[in-house]
Amino acid sequence: MKYLRDISVAFIRSVKLENPALLDSTSATGIRGIRYIKEAGVKEAVLLDVNKKAAGNSKKNLKANKIKAEVLNADLQDFAIRHEGKFDIIDLDPFGSPAPYIYDLLKLSKDGTMLMITATDTAVLCGAHTSACVKQYGAMPLHNHLCKEVGLRILINYIIRKSAEYNFGVKVMVSISDMHYMRVFLKLEKGAKKAYDSVMQSGFGGYCPSCSSFAYAYGIVPMLHERCVECGGKMQCFGPLFLGRLNEKPLLRRMLAQLDDKNSKKIVKLLIDEYETPFFYFMPKITRILGTSSVSYDLVSESLKEKGHQCTRTLFDPDGIKTDADARTVTAAVKAAKARSQ
């Protein structure tokens, strides 16, 4: 996971906090905390791990790197109750779901705190275990090609709802879903109005398996059609989930300038180029509906752009298309692209 640590270092460097105090709440061997101190200008760091052996390894690794930081072998919940200060940056990378730890992070946060939170329970968030997602995140997932984006947005919505209870609004800065994990970089903003505005960026979505169209609506009680407006098929509803912007492009550009590793650069570059809109179309699904063979993304993109639409690739799937076009227009573009290729 070196390239993910590269991205985290680039994030801290790019937000340009002065002498930030950092908590690595699941420090393991201490490698993240060490890199934050050596490479990202962190002056004050606490490395926390409930595992005694892990805490011991962190101390050894700090000594080997000639770095000073506080290492604690403690449970995050106990630490959050006892610790009096607040942190500028908090990193949480647990085994599985981050959901049980969000309240503890909020107790240690203040106005402007940056949260870097990882989830590795992707099977839950992506709908392979629907009941677990309902229980853990209070949301209905979607188990198809949209599952990674839907899961990531469910995770963000969960953090927003919990943060609102502490009168924190949440500014989403960077969002990544790749391989077996999801990671979000967030900024907390104190205030009841900020909290309310963040909650109102969430809503519900609907997906039509018959024609691959989707719809979404903002709000606590949004109005969604039971039937697809494109083809009349029955919609699959999902959510609640965050429907706002997933990435702050100027920040990503600053991060890109900090990166050397090709894998991390590839991810950040893709996020910079990606058109910002909820959800995407999956070309293999559309070609299956049409009963035809695969088609080139470049040809589909060319056809959509000729009609005046935005069109980009997406990090969520190499065969996905992010666009402002509706399902009928995308289907027509796939047909046109197929005709051009023959």
Image (spheres, helix red, strand yellow):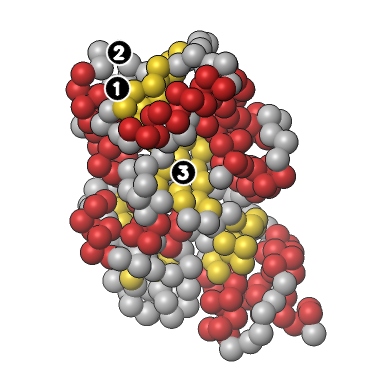
The amino acid type, in three-letter code, at marker 2 is: Gly
Query: Which residue is depicted at the point 58% across and 76% down?
Result: 284
Residue occupied by mark 3: 183
**SS class of the residue under badge 3?**
strand
Nearer-N-terminus badge (1/2) = 2
Between residue 184 and residue 75, name the one nearer to us.
75
CB under 8 Å between discs 1 and 2: yes
The percent position of residue 257, horizontal first and vertical second, equals 71, 30
CB under 8 Å between discs 2 and 3: no
Please tell me the numbered disc located at residue 174: none
Q: Count residues near mark 2 (Cα–Cα under 10 Å), then give few for <14, some for 14-19, many for 20+.
A: few
The amino acid type, in three-letter code, at marker 1 is: Leu
Nearer-N-terminus badge (2/3) = 2
CB under 8 Å between discs 3 and 1: no
Query: On screen, 81 above or below 179?
Result: above
Query: Which residue is depicted at the point 37% across and 18% down?
Result: 87
Q: Is residue 282 visible?
A: yes
Residue occupied by mark 1: 108
Nearer-N-terminus badge (3/1) = 1
User: Left of 268 or right of it: where is 133?
Assistant: left
Residue occupied by mark 2: 85
Determine the image quadrant of residue 88: top left
